[in-house]
Image (spheres, helix red, strand yellow):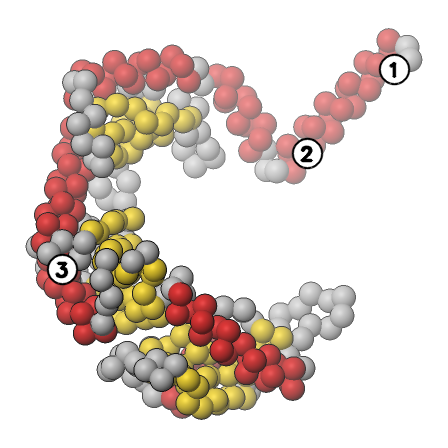
Amino acid sequence: MSIGMVVIKYILVAIVLLIALGLLGGCGLLFIVHGWTGMPRKKARKKFTEYLARELGNDIRVLAFYRFYNTGNMNPNMFSIELQDVNREKVHFAVYWDAKKEQLDRPMYGEERNTLKSKYLFALERYQAYEAIRMEIVPLADNITWSMQYVTLHFTTPLTLEMMKSISAQFAASISKYPVLSFYTYHLHFNSNGDTNWLRTEIYKEGDDFPFKVVHYGFDTKSRQFNQLSKQLMESRDRYNNLRGTELYSENPVILVNQEDCMDLYVTYIFQEQAAAGKVQLKDFVGVLAIHFDMNKSEILSEKYIQGHRWKYLPDLYKDLQEQIGSKYQ
């Protein structure tokens, strides 16, 4: 191949790449260009480490340091940084930092705390709230773990329904004392001897000046009981599905728990029309199978198939369903 042909080949390859980047809205090309002009990550990290030492001393360390350039901020010098208290490993927080200006990015979502010190103090206050709640709950449970809005209580003894309800109410009262925990909803799960229990609790407050309260009991689909339940109900589900020539909207059922006693529930499977062979189309909901199940007896009480006739959206479907089975099942 001649030198001229080689040059033409590389020119064509370059053109194809530029066209591909253009089809992506130019984002890829923009990223490459700005990536070249942004401050090198190693240099930016060194500058931030010096900035961190000036602001907070040597008790905070950097866990992660990434460039945070995107088409939203259009700033190749923006970095996302995760920090941790050296002496309290559970105290950690994240910041966005402009390496060129050597300052934190603007507050997000109306946040007022926008200095390293204020963000650290907020993280510390939140950690102290977690610890205080843990100490209040530990006499009731063996341990407690947090993952954002999801809280798991661990036990080494069997749990009764009344115990879980009582502990849920006490947890709501405890968490209400600490406004630094800014979520309005928490999901409480129970773990006994390594197994997730079937009951889960949703705790909610209406606003900053309101206490938390238990608002909903649900069925935890990660539990051992859910696996047993699914095996019992699969035969009914498949029988109705095959008789009508439909298909399942989802393999995972929606479980509506009796909010008054929590011991009976409806397991619901949604059926939709089958798509024509070789076609992709929006399929209407054609029916829902509601299987009434008794948790005390571990047996099916009844099966109810509700024919769909005007459902285009899931809220319409569940509105009809609750009219037929009762609003106490949620």
Task: State which quadrant residue 80 falls in.
Answer: top left
- Measured Cα–Cα span from mark 2 to mark 3: 60 Å
Q: Amino acid at mark 2?
A: Ala
- Label 3 sits on residue: 140
Task: State which quadrant residue 3 falls in.
Answer: top right
Q: Residue at x 68, y 34 (%)?
A: 20
Q: Residue at x 42, y 18 (%)?
A: 41
Q: Position of residue 281 (x, y in %)?
A: 66, 68
Q: Secondary structure at mark 1?
A: helix
Q: Secondary structure at mark 2?
A: helix
Q: Amino acid at mark 1?
A: Met
Query: How busy is the neighbourhood of tag 3: few (under 14 within 10 Å), some, or many (20 plus)?
Result: some
Residue 20: mark in rendering: 2
**Is residue 81 or residue 37 the one in the foreground?**
81
Q: Amino acid at mark 3?
A: Leu
Residue 105 seen from this side: no
Q: Position of residue 95 (x, y in %)?
A: 29, 31
Quadrant (top left/top right/bottom left/bottom right) for the C terminus: bottom left
Q: Position of residue 301 (x, y in %)?
A: 41, 89
- Label 1 sits on residue: 5
Residue 49 seen from this side: yes
Q: How many numbered tags mark residues here?
A: 3
Which of the two discs, 2 and 3, labels the residue nearer the N terminus? 2
Q: Residue at x 37, y 25 (%)?
A: 65
The single residue placed furthest to the top in the displayed view is 3
Camera-side mark, 2 or 3: 3
Mark 1 and mark 3 in contact (Cβ < 8 Å)? Answer: no
Q: Secondary structure at mark 3?
A: loop
